Amino acid sequence: MQRILKTSVLTVLTLQLLVMDAVAQDQIPTYTTKTRRFEIPYTVTSMDASAVTTLWVSVDRGKAWSAFAKETGQGGSFQFQTKQDGEYWFRSQTGAEQVSSGSTPQLRVYVDATPPRIQMTARNLPEGDVLIESLVTDQTVVANQVLMQITTGPNSPWEVLPFQGKPIRLENGDVRAVSRYKPTTASRVVVVRTIARDGAGNTTGLTKQVFVTPSSEP
């Protein structure tokens, strides 16, 4: 199960660093965070206080592993920092000179410090309705965390625009949401907005003015 990391310290997880049996992929502790700097606590059950523990990191899902930091003692924290978003696998081991390709991680973290990017278009249909389409780009965007709203004037409240079907995830990972608005007021201009929240908690909103042809229906 994937969890959102709301602090810079993985306090809910302590890595056990002696012998790690193979772990199924769906059982590996997995977190999503919007910070690119965090701590990974660890403990060592060895009685040798001088034992060196190495934090190994993989950015290609276990194909290659790099030694990121070394610590001595029976417990503490590794300070991890990266300049890029992405999926990071971690292993901590004592006395290991290398980690074999294909090794299973003890911890998996998705770093997503970038808010979602939204593209929105509005098109007037011949019958007077307005078709609104939003495309949300983000590596951890959640389809059910996309919201579309409309207001018909500066003193009017925002109202939720119902979707035409549920927002869907495209093959490239983007999320597409479509709504259809039927003008019912004398206003010639409305404002629509899309709000999107990704799996790390980053939120983005985009607004757009739309010129409409009011419907003759009440």
Image: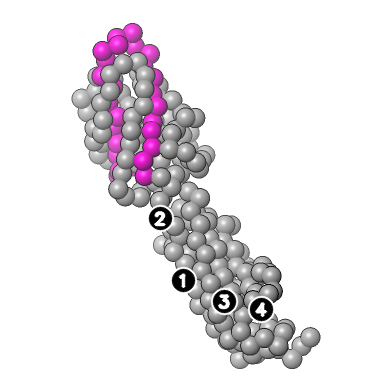
CB contact under 8 Å: marks 1 and 2: no
Dividing the image into 4 quarters, which one contains the C terminus?
bottom right
Q: Nearer the viewer, mark 4 or mark 3?
A: 4
Question: What is the distance, in whole Å, between disc 2 and disc 4 at their CAs?
Answer: 31 Å
Where is 11 relative to 145, above or below?
above
Question: What is the distance, in whole Å, between disc 1 and disc 3 at their CAs?
Answer: 11 Å
Q: Earlier in the sequence, mark 1 or mark 2?
A: 2
Q: Hey, what amino acid is under mark 1?
A: Gln
Q: Secondary structure at mark 1?
A: strand
Question: What is the distance, in whole Å, between disc 4 and disc 3 at their CAs?
Answer: 15 Å
Q: Secondary structure at mark 3?
A: strand
Counting every numbered tag in the picture gives: 4
Identify which residue, 129 or 6, lies in the foreground.
6
Where is 18 relative to 152, above or below?
above
**Residue 47 in magenta?**
yes
Q: Hey, what amino acid is under mark 3?
A: Ile
Q: Nearer the viewer, mark 1 or mark 4?
A: 4
Disc assigned to residue 132? 3
Q: Magenta part of the protein: which range?
A: 36-61
**Residue labelled with disc 4:** 152
Residue 7 position within the rendered picture, expressed as x and y whole percent measured from the top left:
47, 38
**Residue labelled with disc 2:** 114
In this rendering, position of residue 159 left or right of residue 139: right
Q: Residue 192's image quarter?
A: bottom right
Q: Nearer the viewer, mark 2 or mark 4?
A: 4
Q: Residue 98's image quarter?
A: top left
Residue 41 position within the rendered picture, expressed as x and y whole percent measured from the top left:
40, 27
